[in-house]
């Protein structure tokens, strides 16, 4: 997607729907410094969605879409689940895969894009729930890491199967009782961030989506590292408020509680020293560029 592709034809401008005209006027495509602060003013960052009221996944989608640095040359690969309800409404190229094979699809896509567009940066992102990532699709997820595929995997960790009634998932907390897991989970939450790092991911982040600046930082770091080094992984806590017995306005409080001191979603990053140095250099370059641009427009 790009500003040129969505531009209005002058001869038809007066008959185009006002929603499309607003998209053309407010879209952030081509803006190198786009970010989460554009959510309230940009049409393409999901004006509406079909998820439940107050769903943290809708927040996650908005933050991710606003944070990816190259939206006009990016592709989302999704899987069956609540996320599949949102993909038809996003202003980013996307593919819906079968349940669990999203990383296999992304692998082929990333390789094909590299061959078809050797002189352009093309970013691929997997967006899938915990069932598709750690349970049904774990084999294909890990195999893409073993092969060092250069894309980012983002797991929406609901800590249960939110789309099908609240069954137990590998990322559910031990002892948690859900509608379709009435006796409580018998084993600890699978440590997928550590598994990802040990399996070859060069950058791993675990956090909630309560703080947009942190999500933006993690998405950008994961993207830049994936381009240069190989696979990256982000695990976002997006609790299904419906299945855990919360009200529509309580999702944010649930996430904040889980990231408080000692909580299971205190933000963590795993990376090698080489990647840490690369990120520091990249962010310094971006900061200097923005400073220079600001000085020119002042």
Image (cartoon, helix red, strand yellow):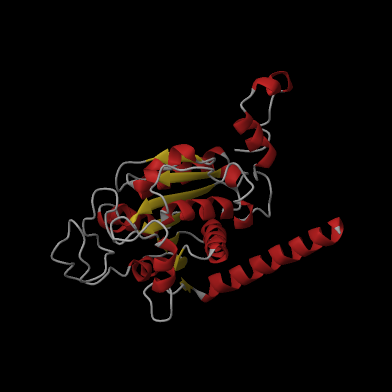
Q: Position of residue 68 (x, y in %)?
A: 57, 53
Q: Quadrant of the N terminus?
A: top right
Q: Residue furthest top?
A: 11
Please give the name of the residue rendered at 38% of the width and 48% of the height, measured from the top-left corner.
52
Can residue 100 be seen from the camera position used here? Answer: yes
Please give the name of the residue rendered at 67% of the width and 37% of the height, measured from the top-left corner.
3
Relative vertical location of residue 76 with respect to residue 220 in this rendering, above or below: above
Q: Is residue 255 left or right of residue 27?
A: left
Relative vertical location of residue 77 with respect to residue 291 in this rendering, above or below: above
Q: Position of residue 81 (x, y in %)?
A: 32, 46
Residue 141 figure quarter = bottom left
Front residue of 139/41: it is 41
Q: Position of residue 179 (x, y in %)?
A: 19, 57
Q: Position of residue 90 (x, y in %)?
A: 50, 41
Please give the name of the residue rendered at 42% of the width and 45% of the height, measured from the top-left corner.
77
Label count reads 0
């Amino acid at each position: 997607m790009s500003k040129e592709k969505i531009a209005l034809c002058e001869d038809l401008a007066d008959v185009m729907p006002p929603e499309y005209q607003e998209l053309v006027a407010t879209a952030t495509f081509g803006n190198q410094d786009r970010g989460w602060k554009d959510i309230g003013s940009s049409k393409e960052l999901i004006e509406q969605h079909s998820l439940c009221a107050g769903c943290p996944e809708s927040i996650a989608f908005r933050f991710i879409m606003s944070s990816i640095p190259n939206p006009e040359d990016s592709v989302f690969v999704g899987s069956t689940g609540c996320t599949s309800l949102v993909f038809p409404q996003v202003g980013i190229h996307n593919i819906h895969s079968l349940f669990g094979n999203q990383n296999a699809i992304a692998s082929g896509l990333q390789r094909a894009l590299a061959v078809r567009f050797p002189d352009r940066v093309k970013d691929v992102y997997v967006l899938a729930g915990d069932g598709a990532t750690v349970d049904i699709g774990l084999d294909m997820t890990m195999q893409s890491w073993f092969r060092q595929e250069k894309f980012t995997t983002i797991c929406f960790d609901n800590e249960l199967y939110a789309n099908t009634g609240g069954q137990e998932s590998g990322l559910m907390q031990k002892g948690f009782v859900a509608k379709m897991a009435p006796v409580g989970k018998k084993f600890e939450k699978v440590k997928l961030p550590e598994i990802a790092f040990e399996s070859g991911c060069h950058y791993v982040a675990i956090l909630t989506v309560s703080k947009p600046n942190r999500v933006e930082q993690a998405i950008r770091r994961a993207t830049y590292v994936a381009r240069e080094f190989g696979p990256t992984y982000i695990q976002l806590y997006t609790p299904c408020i419906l299945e855990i017995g919360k009200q529509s306005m309580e999702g944010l409080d649930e996430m904040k509680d889980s990231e408080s001191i000692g909580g299971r979603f205190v933000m963590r990053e795993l990376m090698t020293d080489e990647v840490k140095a690369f990120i520091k250099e990249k962010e310094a370059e971006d900061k200097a560029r923005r400073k220079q641009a600001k000085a020119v427009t002042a």
